[in-house]
Structures are given as C-alpha cells and as structure tokens.
Image: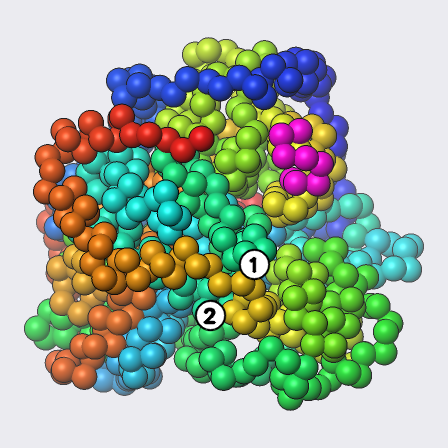
Amino acid sequence: MIFTEEMLQSMKKVEAARATNISYEPPRMTAEEKEALLAEYHPDYKDAGFATIKTGPNKGERAPVELVEVLEGRSRVLDLNVDLDKIDYDVDVLVIGGGGSGASAAIEAHEAGANVMIVTKLRIGDANTMMAEGGIQAADKPNDSPALHYIDVMGGGHYVNRPELVRKLVMDGPSAIKWLNDLGVEFDKDENGNMITTHGGGTSRKRMHAAADYSGAEIMRTLRDEVLNRQIPVIDFTAAIELILDDEGKAAGAVLQNMETGEVLVARAKCVIIATGGAGRMHYQGFPTSNHHGATADGLVIGYRAGAKLLYQDTLQYHPTGVAFPQQIFGALVTEKVRSMGAKLVNSEGEVYVHPLETRDVNAAAVIRECSTNGKGVSTPTGGKAVWLDTPMIDMIHGKGTLEKRLPAMLRMYLKFGIDMRETPILIYPTLHYQNGGLEIGANGMTNVENLYVVGEAVGGIHGRNRLMGNSLLDIIVFGRNAGKQTGARFKDITVGKLSLAHVEKYADELKAAGIESNTPSPKLFPDYTRKF
Amino acid sequence: MEKMVNVFLYGKKYEVPAGLTIMEAMEYAGYNLVRGVGCRNGFCGACATVYRIKGDRELKACLACSTTVENDMYIATLPFFPLVKEAYDIEKVRPDQQIMMQLYPEIYACVGCNACTKSCSQGLNVMQYIAYAQRGDFENCAEESFDCVMCGICSSRCPAGISHPQVAMLARRLNGKYLSPESVHLTERIKEIEDGLCSEAIEALMEKPISEIKELYNNRDIEK
C-alpha cells in the first residue's frame, strides 16, 4: 500500500514515541470534561443534522434529517393493489429481519410451539450481527455482578436508559451466554473453561466475551444453523414494506414485497416481531458506515406508521475507529477490541491525546476535535483527516503472534490492501455504527401497539443515548429470546380480526394536512450507490 | 484525471476508476445490487466472486467487497451456490465420527485435489479441515475452519461435491457445545441469579435517584 509522504512522516513520529506511549496511562476525563467535549464535537449535538417530526406519536420531537425524510415519505403500498383477502402466509409469529435478534426470537417462539416465519430483505445472517467483532458483555466473573454491569450501562447511556430494560439486559446476560454456548458457539476460553474476557470502553470489569474478532459472525452463523435445523421458514430477498393491523388496531401481519421480482405478498400473523436492525446506510450527516447493506431503519418507519412510539431516535453512535484509509474500506469497523488489547489512539504528532477506553461517544468526539480544532490529524486521499491507532503496540505488550491470534479478521482486512497492522499503525476516523434509539418497548418486548414486538437494534431505551461495546450482541440475544418466549406464550390466546391498512392512509392524510407531500419511497429498503448518468 | 481500468462484468467491458473494489466497480457501472451484496466488509460471504486476469491461466476467487479491481479482469459473481445443509438436533447428536458419516458421507470421497484450499476467499486450509472432519477430530476442524464466511466458493470447485462450509459448521457447533470445557463461573453466576441473590442489589439501584447513580458511576473502581 502506498502511504502518502505526509503519512510516512507522521508515522515516524508515532514510531519514535511508541515505547514511551505504551507505558503512558492517559488520565480519564471528568464528567464535566466529557460533557463539554460532546457538546462541542459529537454529531448528535449538531443541530443542522436534525429536523422536527411533524406527524405521528413523536410529533414535535427531533430526528436525523434523513430519517424524517423517510418518515415523511410515500408509503410503498399506496401505489400497489394490495388484496388483504388473499393471504399468502398465515402464521402465529412473523419475524421481520434475519439478524441475531430475529433468529433468537424465532428459535424461542418455535421452541414454545409457535408456527413462526422469518422474512428478510437479504439473506438470513446478512445483518449487523454478522459484523460485530469485539465481543459480548455479561457479568459472569467472580469480581463482577449484574449490579456493576447495570451502573456501567446507565453511565455509558447518560442515565436516560429505561431501568427495567437495563435490569433485564444485565440479569439475563449470563444465561444468554450459556444459551449460546449450549447451541455450540465457540467462546474464547482458557484450558479450565474460564472465559477469556477483556475491557470495552466504559466498562468497570473485564466482561467482554469473544470468539476472536469474529464474535458476531460466530454467534450469527450458529443461530442461522439452528433456525435451519428447526426448519423454520425463511422468506429471503423479501422486505416487509408495511405492517398490517386488524380492525381493533392490533398488529396482525405485514405486506411483503419480493426484492427481485416485485411480487406483493400478504402475511397474516398473531404476533409481529420487528427485528429490522439499524440505520447506517442512511448515512446520517454524511458519515460513512460500518453497517451492512440493508441497514435503512425500515422497522422504525413501518412501526411508526402503525402507531408505535419512537424513543431516542435523535441519538446515533459514531464508532471512534472506522477505517479512514485505504479508501476501499473507508468507514469499515476497526473493532474496539484493538483498544481493549492495548493499542492507543495517537495524533499526527505522535501524542496520546485521550484514554483509549473512554466510551465511544467521547472517543469519537475526541477524534473529531483532534482532526479539527487541534489540527493534529493526518490528511487522507479522500480529503478527510484521521488519527492513528497504534496497533503494533499489541504484540509488544502481549507477545508476538497475539494480534494474529486474537484479531484475525482485522489483520486479514488490512492485509488484503497491503497494510500489515502488526508492523504499521492504522488511520481511523469515526464511522456511523449504531442506532442508539428506536421503537419503545416495555420489559415484555411489546410496543404500545398490541401484539407488535421489537427486538435488537430497532429498539430504543436499552442503551440510553450511548451504547457500550458488547451490549448490542447481548441485547439481541436477551431481548430476542424474550420476545420469542413472550409471543410463544401468548399466540394461542390471540384471535386476529379483519386485516386493514387504514392506518397507512390515515398517516398519509396527516402528512397532507401538515402540508407535506413527498414522493420519496418509504421505507428506504436499500441505499443507492449506482453512478448516475 | 482519475486513472481508469477496464473490467469485464459477466463478459461485458466497463471502464472504471482504478482503486475501486469489485463491488464498487459494479455500482459504478450502474448495477443496483440486491444479490451478491451483504455486509460489504468481508464477514457475511454474500459476494463470492470468481475472476481471471486476461492472459492468466489461473481462475481466482475472492469476495467482491474486499478486492480491488485490476485491469483486464474478467468477473463473474457467485451470489448463491447450492450447498447441502443437513438438519440435525444439536441436543441429540454426539461429537463422534459417526455423525459425519451419517450427515455428510461425501467428505470421504475427497480426492485430495486441493481445489477448495486454492479457491478459499479467506485463505484457509480447507482440505485440511475436511481431513480433520473425516477423522472425527472436531476440535482441529473447528480451529482450522474458524474464519470461514461460508461463501461457498470451495464447494463450487469440489469434484466430490462436498459442502465444506456446512461440514465445518457442524464441527464447530459440536466442539463449542460438547468438547470445550464448561465455564464453571458462568454456571455459578446463573444459579446465583436464579436463586435471587442478585435481585436486591439491582432493585436498590433502580430506586436510586439519578444523582446517586451518577455518583456511583463517576467514582466506580475500574479493574486494571
């Protein structure tokens, strides 16, 4: 890989300072310092990135401009002739989304005897779960406890997390790990069976369980295998473009559309579980993203139109260490585990300017400050700035071969472009990583719309305004299983009334009354990266 | 002026900027992808691709999201390959050689051509992990196959019709569930939680005003 002359010059400073930087423990910021930094530099605080929601349950609140545009867009069903009397699929539990939370929900609902079906607009496993690298938290070590985990989650989330959801997250954490292990997930363990755990940003105990840096992939492929073993139907390349309610306003299914042929299908269900994931491909505020191709907030949009409330829809997570160079993998994730294992963040002058294990929002803001006001960023060919993540430190601290063993995916990703991160530091800049907010649920997993459940990244409230590393893989399992069990216990008592899409027309009328007439197709479904001629 | 290269997508020539990945080159050419696209970052295996550089005899395989285009590259994506995936009950199977013979007997028809290893988009020693599976050595099969993204290119090249990724998937689950040692601290913590020993502390926290939670958070002891 050809580094620029400026990069090479700066790299020399990083190398010269490395021995000193390894032993230097930078101070942690005070609460006041963090607040001031976030207010000045974090994208969530940039008013220009937000607009006001003008209709629906969250009217008057703010949301990212790009999300508001889709919320105000034109429902795809309005231009289709959907015949709700022609039922293509009739199931007990309909799971929309084929990631880790959807698969977990489907497995538990199936276990409880429900007739369950998954629909997904790509394939099962094409999801952010697959790309989670660093690990999964759970308080299972003797020096740890769910209470300590609880405090970390609340502090990381700026104390606005829903306490009942946090309780569930931390109390059900250890059993989630056991469930995965019993399904055959290969966690990193020592020869005595002790889980090998590390810190994440903002954790007070080393409770990050991992499967090398393929943690999410290992979990996802195992869950997928289990779904297939159980022969749960997976309708792939098929998006849910609108929810169906019954005449009592309860969730009763979804309108589906084949992504390749355009065929429209109707699914009726006693319970619907939204497991549609995040929104990185909305590219809020123009950021690149670490997310998979289908992360376009579809579930938030169709849930909202059906009357479900959003919570903290105005807070996003920008992962501090996205790839800034080379351009082919711009925005891809460099796992936080790289910092957990000792690599420090270093500016263009070779200075360690921040504690590497501050929470993600703080570290992202600190990178942006370093690259803007402080003028200590390195220029990249795409016109941006970046700071260094000094990866050679890892083998220097833990011994040669450690990086290869514990971070094989990262090493491979860079080697494909001729960069050996064992030898040279890497250039990083924040990337749009996670949707902190989403649809509001109670501890039973259900929204304010009866029989409508939400799991995974589409949920708001678990992580407050900032999620800690490793709590997303945990929440998809805990809340995915929860929704599967809840629907599995309830479906027999549910009778579905007459199917209706009246809520979609009502929502369109409200938009019109508010003076909004948009032809933007909604939900978005996919980003469009094609060159325009 | 941006440097351009010629690529041949399914045989048709397009001029695209040098430095794009194959996936980006397809989008630059105007393809709006639904198939052959997933995580866009080397983890999901959706974008298996084969290519040949003009004049080169060797057929190469890669992931379109993680490979830079080259001049005179003839590209065909492999968005789906019909692998054999046998259903089994993870609670009933046992980690012995018998299970491989029962579910994936074709692994014993391996002719040792090594085409699987040569084509692996992750650079894994695929033939070796199949050899481990044949012997019922699931621990080594799991270890050797761990970085597999199940793109299926290996199986497309196999004269014996082996579905390598599914064989490895079975081996890893058997290893994770039955062969790796139990985590006693995990089992014990779950019991503590089930016995209600952790509930009081959580409930006490839930009742505290935010100011006290802040105090606890800002002064908490962080493990070295």
Which residues lie in the magenta part? A396-403
**Residue at left offset 66%, top offset 54%:** B64
Q: Where is residue B102 in the image (x, y as percent from the top left)?
A: 64, 88
Label 1 is placed on what type of residue? Cys
Q: What residue type is labelled 2?
A: Leu
Residue in the foreground of this view, choosing between B141 and A398: A398
For mark 1, give the secondary structure. loop
Q: Inspect the magenta stretch and tell me whether residue A399 lies in it.
A: yes
| Residue B202 against residue A203 in the figure, above or below | below
Residue A341 in percent (x, y) is at 55, 35
Mark 2 falls within which chain?
A
Q: Mark 2 points at which residue?
A: A183
Q: Of residues A230 and B38, which is closer to you in this image?
A: A230
Helix, strand or loop under label 2? helix
Magenta stretch: helix, strand or loop mostly: helix
Q: Residue furthest bottom?
A: B102
Q: Which residue lies furthest to the left in this view?
A: A248
Q: Name the residue under label 1.
A: B44
Q: x, y percentage for residue A487?
A: 23, 73
Check the picture and name the quadrant holding the N terminus of chain A.
Answer: top right
The residue lying at 55 percent from left, 31 percent from top is: A342
Q: Give the residue displayed 47% in from the left and 27% down from the top.
A: A356
The residue shown at (46%, 70%) is: A183
Compared across the picture, whether A347 is left or right of B78 comes to left
What is the chain letter for disc 1?
Answer: B
Judge left or right: residue A126 versus residue B3. Answer: left
Q: How crowded is mark 1: few (under 14 residues within 10 Å), some or many (20 or more)?
A: many
